[in-house]
Image (spheres, grey):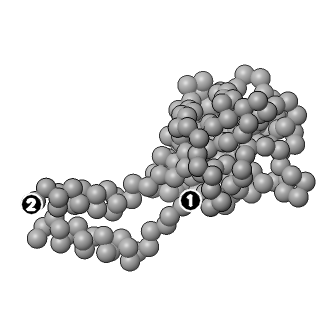
Amino acid sequence: MAPKHQLLCALLVLLLANVWCYQYKVGDLDSWGLPTPANPKVYENWSLKHKFKIGDSLLFLYPPSQDSVIQVTEQAFNSCTIKDPILYTNDGNSVFNLTTPGNLYFISGKPGHCEKSQKLHVSVLLANGSAFFPSASAPTALPATSPAYPTVFGPSPPSSLGSRRFPRSVAAALAGAVSVILLCFI
């Protein structure tokens, strides 16, 4: 098989393997900040309309001199406690990679902001898209070595598109499979 066909074949196999990860801009807003009176549940509603999977990431954008993001336990999330966070970031461009299934909790590091609903709870699905149900004996708090960690990639280009999710249709998957068969085996 010609080298260019091998490369094309490999790319098509990756596409068919459904290796898709998405970076979500939290809240589809210009920045992580206090919800407006017109939309006080912006983060709650935003989280409910997305299905987060392992491999996806959350991007929190905010002025570093004015805010921060704290990953906390469920208990700290519910009580808006900013002491003893799992992770604290204040760089203004915080990316949290979703590497394990389960629930993650984030609040603003500015005193009083969490109480004004600047907080986010996300449920991360298993890679196959099914929900994760921890056992009854599992602790509800995340360990101090939580695998969700910030990775700063530099500033993101401005976009009015918000979250980008590109669902694949069955027809596209079938067309890809036929292409792989034709290119790889003929």
| Disc number for residue 1 | 2
How many numbered marks, from 0 up? 2
- At horizontal 28% and vertical 57% (from top left) the residue drawn is 11
User: Where residue 127 appears, x then y in whole percent?
Assistant: 46, 51
- At horizontal 67% and vertical 42% (from top left) the residue drawn is 61
- The C terminus, quarter of image: bottom left
Instruction: Mark 1: give few (<14), some (14-19) or many (20+) Cα within 10 Å.
Output: few
The part of the image, by quadrant, that contains residue 49 is bottom right
User: Where residue 173 appears, x then y in whole percent?
Assistant: 36, 71
Instruction: Mark 2: give few (<14), some (14-19) or many (20+) Cα within 10 Å.
Output: few
Of the two numbered discs 1 and 2 on the same chain, state the one appearing first in sequence. Answer: 2
Q: Is residue 126 among what the camera can see?
A: no
| Residue closer to the observer: 143 or 108 | 108
| Disc number for residue 164 | 1
- The N terminus, quarter of image: bottom left
Which residue occupies the extreme right position in the image? 37
Name the element at disc 2. loop
